[in-house]
Structures are given as structure tokens and as C-alpha cells.
Image (cartoon, helix red, strand yellow):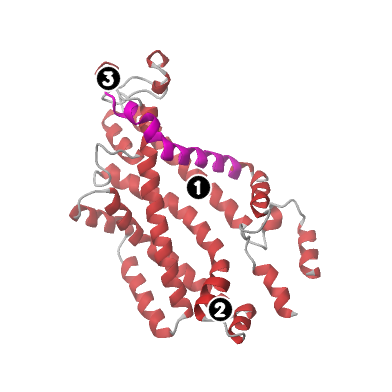
């Protein structure tokens, strides 16, 4: 009986259950800021997926007569609504096309670091003390170097490319997921439902991936959303320093770097890609705050339209 009372309070939202997606959608509509952030991020993802195919030629076509054209120059066409760069290329088209590389680097680094870090964290939290100490010392070695400084040193040695940038940024973020996962596993493995699974003869792999990982996953997803914004800012910083993505490839950070010499005469060259970075980062932070509440069974009632007394009554009756 005690075990049946403990399980509901620790069970995360399972998106595979019927109606779970609709349930999350309803909770999203109750947070207007998170809803606007989600819509904006969907637009950014669509730009990253289809932008190069639709506007790739326009983003590279030079027109020296229209160099540094100011914003809202509609006489040149709707693509010049944000102005043009020093070679007369429309900024709107370039921002849309640059979204692909920016999102690719951030998504690749986050997925890689979360996969490796979570796997090592599960092993460190569930395995014996010796294995745990070895893995944690590895995390300490990585954390002993400032992440951005480590990326700068490595990218000065290796040729700048999307692959190298993803690998470098991913390695610097592995300890975040490793330490978080290990701390969660150390607490979850002592819960009653895990002990019951051991008594019933479940294998270690089944216990880790069937019972422990689903409880840890919401925390990892929330951290990954925040980390996505951090990695995107790190990529923009490296591109701004000139050791990130190199022309003819473009990212938002590289566009800001290219617009820096024209800040006094053509501020829009750096302003619009910088605004894209700010809005995307802000949207990720707002969405991550919503996810932290939506995936937490103890706080989910705030988005489901129920009162705190109703939530307490359901818990006591359950």
C-alpha cells in the first residue's frame, strides 16, 4: 500500500499515453509567455529546416548598389525589410539561412553532451563506489577548465568547422548532465519501487532504463532546454571572435561579428542577428521554466487549472 501511494507523486508525464500530448498542449495555453515562446521557437526551427532551400540563393546574391541599405527599404523587395549588408545581400534572407547552422551546432552539442553525460551519470549513480569515483574524477578534469576558454584553445588548434564546434562545445557541457544525473540516481535508487523491482528479480539494465531513467528524464529535458541557449550563446561568441563558423557558411554570431565595423554607420547589420539571438535565448528560458512546472507532478496543478486544495485532496485520496 505504501508503494502504491509513492508512485503517483514521482511519476513524470508520459507523452506516449493517449491524450498526454493534448494535456501538455492545454497546460501550455495556460502560460501565455511560454506559448508565445514555443510559437517563436517553432518558427525558428522551420526557418532552420526550410530556409536554405527557399532563400539560399537570395542570401548569397550580391548587389553592391544596395550595400548597407537601411531597414524597411521596400522599394527593393520584401526581402530587404531588415536592410542589406556590406555586399548588398538582404539581411532577412541571411538571418533565415543562418538559423540552420546556429540551430545545428546548438542541437548537436546538447544532444551529444546529454547522451554521454546522462549515460555516465546513470552508471556513476547506480554502480559501485570505485566506478563512480573514476567517472566523477573525469568530470572534475573537464570542469577544471573554463568551458569557453577550452573551446577557444581547441578551435585554435583544429580547423574551424561545424563538426569540430559541436564536439568541443559538447565536451565542455558533459559534466552538467553527468553530475545532475548521478545526484538524481543516488536518491531514486533508494525508493521503494526500485527496491521492489530488485526483489522481483529485474535486471540492472531494466531497473536503470525502465524505472530510473523515466524519473530522471524530465530534469534532463529541462536542463537541456536551458543548455541549448547557453551553447547557442557560446557558438555566437566563438563566431564573434572569428574562430567559429567561417564564411561562406553563416551563423547569427558571425553576422554580428561582420556587422561590428559598421555599428556607427549601419547599426542594423549587427542589430537584427543579435536580436534573433536574444529572442531565441529568451524563448528557451521561458519554455524551460514552463517545462520545469509541467513535468513536475507536485507543481503541475498550477497549469492544470486546479487549486492547491484540490491537488492536496487528490494526493490524500490516492
Vertical placement of residue 300 versus 236, above or below: below
Residue 295 visible in the displayed image: yes
Point out the tag, 3 or 2, that comes first from the N-terminus: 3
On the image, numbered disc 3 is attached to which residue? 63
Horizontally, is 135 left or right of 292 in the view? left
The residue carrying pointer 2 sits among few (fewer than 14), some (14 to 19) or many (20 or more) residues within 10 Å by Cα, namely some
Give residue 186's position: percent from left, percent from top: 52, 77
Point out the tag, 1 or 3, that comes first from the N-terminus: 3
Q: Which mark is residue 284?
A: 1
Q: Residue at x 40, y 13 (%)?
A: 75
Vertical placement of residue 76 versus 105, above or below: above
Residue 53 is one of the magenta-drawn residues: yes
- Occupied quadrant, residue 132: bottom left
Instruction: Label 3: state its secondary structure.
Output: loop
Write the start and end of the magenta stretch as one range: 34-62
Instruction: Label 1: state its secondary structure.
Output: helix
Q: Residue at x 72, y 52 (%)?
A: 304
Are the residues flagged by discs 1 and 2 in contact, CB closer than 8 Å? no
Q: Could you say which is closer to the camera, residue 36 or residue 248?
A: 248
On the image, numbered disc 2 is attached to which residue? 189
Q: Residue most toward the top?
A: 75
The residue carrying pointer 1 sits among few (fewer than 14), some (14 to 19) or many (20 or more) residues within 10 Å by Cα, namely many
- Occupied quadrant, residue 99: top left
Amino acid at each position: 500500500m505504501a508503494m502504491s501511494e509513492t508512485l503517483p507523486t514521482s511519476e513524470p508525464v508520459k507523452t506516449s499515453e493517449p491524450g498526454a500530448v493534448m494535456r501538455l498542449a492545454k497546460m501550455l495555453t495556460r502560460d501565455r509567455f511560454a506559448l508565445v515562446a514555443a510559437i517563436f521557437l517553432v518558427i525558428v526551427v522551420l526557418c532552420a529546416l526550410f530556409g536554405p532551400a527557399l532563400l539560399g540563393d537570395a542570401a548569397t546574391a550580391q548587389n553592391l548598389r544596395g550595400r548597407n541599405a537601411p531597414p524597411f527599404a521596400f522599394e527593393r523587395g520584401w526581402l530587404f525589410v531588415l536592410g542589406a549588408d556590406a555586399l548588398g545581400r538582404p539581411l532577412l534572407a541571411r538571418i533565415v539561412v543562418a538559423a540552420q547552422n546556429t540551430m545545428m551546432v546548438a542541437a548537436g552539442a546538447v544532444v551529444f553532451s546529454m547522451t554521454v553525460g546522462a549515460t555516465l551519470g546513470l552508471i556513476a549513480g547506480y554502480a559501485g563506489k570505485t566506478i563512480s569515483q573514476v567517472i566523477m574524477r573525469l568530470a572534475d578534469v573537464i570542469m577544471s577548465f573554463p568551458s569557453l576558454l577550452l573551446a577557444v584553445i581547441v578551435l585554435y588548434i583544429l580547423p574551424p568547422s561545424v563538426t569540430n564546434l559541436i564536439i568541443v562545445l559538447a565536451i565542455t557541457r558533459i559534466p552538467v548532465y553527468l553530475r545532475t544525473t548521478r545526484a538524481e540516481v543516488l536518491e531514486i535508487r533508494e525508493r521503494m519501487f526500485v527496491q521492489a523491482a530488485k526483489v522481483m528479480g529485474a535486471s540492472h539494465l531494466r531497473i536503470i532504463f525502465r524505472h530510473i531513467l523515466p524519473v530522471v528524464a524530465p530534469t534532463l529535458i529541462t536542463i537541456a532546454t536551458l543548455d541549448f541557449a547557453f551553447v547557442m550563446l557560446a557558438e555566437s561568441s566563438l563566431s564573434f571572435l572569428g574562430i567559429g563558423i567561417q564564411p561562406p557558411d553563416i551563423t547569427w554570431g558571425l553576422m554580428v561579428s561582420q556587422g561590428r565595423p559598421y555599428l556607427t554607420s549601419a547599426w542594423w547589420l549587427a542589430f537584427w542577428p543579435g536580436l534573433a539571438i536574444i529572442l531565441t535565448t529568451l524563448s528557451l528560458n521561458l519554455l524551460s521554466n514552463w517545462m520545469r512546472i509541467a513535468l513536475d507532478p507536485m507543481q503541475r496543478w498550477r497549469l492544470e487549472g486546479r487549486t492547491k486544495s484540490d491537488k492536496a485532496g487528490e494526493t490524500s485520496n490516492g
